[in-house]
Structure formats: C-alpha cells, structure tokens
Image: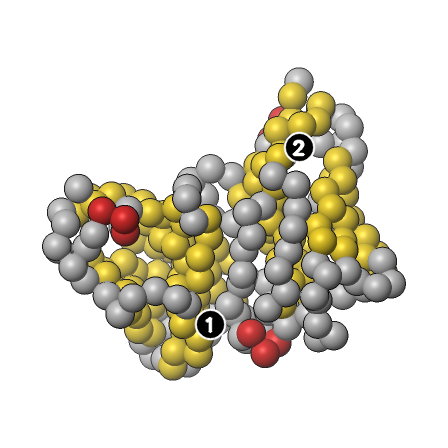
Amino acid sequence: LAKTTQPISMDSYEGQEVNITCSHNNIATNDYITWYQQFPSQGPRFIIQGYKTKVTNEVASLFIPADRKSSTLSLPRVSLSDTAVYYCLVGGNNAGNMLTFGGGTRLMVKP
Amino acid sequence: KAGVTQTPRYLIKTRGQQVTLSCSPISGHRSVSWYQQTPGQGLQFLFEYFSETQRNKGNFPGRFSGRQFSNSRSEMNVSTLELGDSALYLCASSLVVGSNTEAFFGQGTRLTVV
C-alpha cells in the first residue's frame, strides 16, 4: 500500500480556506485517494474521495494533479468545529477494506 | 438509518483477563473492519471480515481474534490482556469490499487495562 506524508499540524482562523497537502509518491494505478476527519474519542468520518483531477462535495474539494503523486484537501471557510485530525489514505480494491492510516494532520482553527 | 454501534463504550479490565467487544454494522453492510488507536501508534488495522470470512489481518499477535456472524455483526476478542492493549478500538462497516468504498466508523470502545 502506498505510504502517505502530510504535515503533522496546521493552524488557521475562522473563515479562512485551509489546504492540506498529502504526498503519495508510490501511488499505484488502481489506488484511490480518500480523506477522513476525526474528532477526539470518535471514529474517523469520510470526507471525500477521488481518483484524478478535482472532486467537490458539500464540505470539501480534493485536487489531484495529473501525476497523482500528491493531493490537496481544501476546506472552504473553516469554523471552530473543523478543528480535528485529517487523514489522507490511498488504496485500491486489492486491499479489501483494509485502510492504512498515517499520522494525519492536526488542524487547529482559532477564533 | 442507524450508524455503526459498538458496545460497550468504556471498559476497564485487569492484566491477564480477556475481553470481547461487539460491533453492529449499518444495516445491509456486510464488511466489518476493526482498528486499534493509541497515542503512540495511531490508527492500526486489526482485521476485516466479509460474509463471515476473515479477508485481511493486520500485524497483531494471536491474542487478538475476531469473528463475524451471519447477520454481519462482529466481535473481537483479546485474551491475556496486557497494559499496552489499552486503546480505543474502532469498528468500521462498508457496503461492499474495496478501498474505494466509504467506511463508516463507530464511536469506539475505550479499553483500559490496569
């Protein structure tokens, strides 16, 4: 499974756009890129998933360049409640439902 | 639609004892995975079950085991508990198999071994 590298922590202020970049140089052809959010003492929650180019849903956007060796999660206009740990994962169907979590990025949103 | 339910939420056990944790997946989901989360090691995959069969297993000792029932409910068991087994144990369910499938996590069981 591809290893991911993302910043350990980031700080932001309410109302700002936050971009968290994840590196996955060894991503395989059939790997998807998925982001999860986790609050303390809760299970992770799916945010967004993509394979290439750009994906947008009601909470975030995911930008994936053509070489797919990195991806950027974009959170528009963050609020205090977006303070959480964000995990970038890559994997394909041959891994079943085995998710490999890295260290994640601890996002702190300040007032 | 009810989410993933894990019981109990909190548990305190003594070293050497054994423990069984339960997970009820979202209705209709047939894949259940288990994870251990500790401050030092982060989130680590334990095992995955689909249609009562273990499909994948993480790098944990044989003291950690699991099973899945015909109704997709799953249990995990840890025998001969060690202090280092203190962790948040998370269960996730998915509709189908595949890492591009959204996994829905429960709130976890916080196990403390004393």
Residue B82 locus on image (x, y percent): 21, 52
Q: Residue at x 44, y 57 (%)?
A: B44
Rendering quarter of residue B52: bottom left
Q: Is residue A46 left or right of residue A33?
A: left
Tell me the residue at 53%/63% (across/down): A99
Query: How far is mark 1 from mark 2, CA to CA?
Result: 34 Å
Residue nearest the observer in this picture, A25 or B35: A25
- Quadrant where the C terminus of chain B lies? top left
Please tell me in which quadrant of the rendered image residue A64 appears. bottom right
Q: Nearer the viewer, residue B28 or B114?
A: B114
Q: Could you tell me the amino acid type at mark 1?
A: Ser
Residue at image mark 2: A10
Coloring basis for residues: secondary structure
Q: Chain of mark 2?
A: A
The subunit carrying tag 1 is: B
Badge 1: residue crowd in 10 Å (few <14, some 14–19, many ≥20): many
Side (left or right) of A98 relative to A28: left
Farthest residue in the top direction? A111
Q: Is residue A93 above or below residue A59?
A: below
Task: Please state which amino acid type lies under the numbered disc 2.
Answer: Met
Q: Residues within 10 Å of mark 2 (few under 14, many from 20)?
A: some
- Report the residue at 35% width, 68% height from top: B73
Query: Helix, strand, or loop for circle 2?
Result: strand
Residue ID for mark 1: B31
Q: Residue at x 39, y 78 (%)?
A: B54
Q: Position of residue A2 (x, y in %)?
A: 63, 65
Q: Which mark is residue A38?
A: none
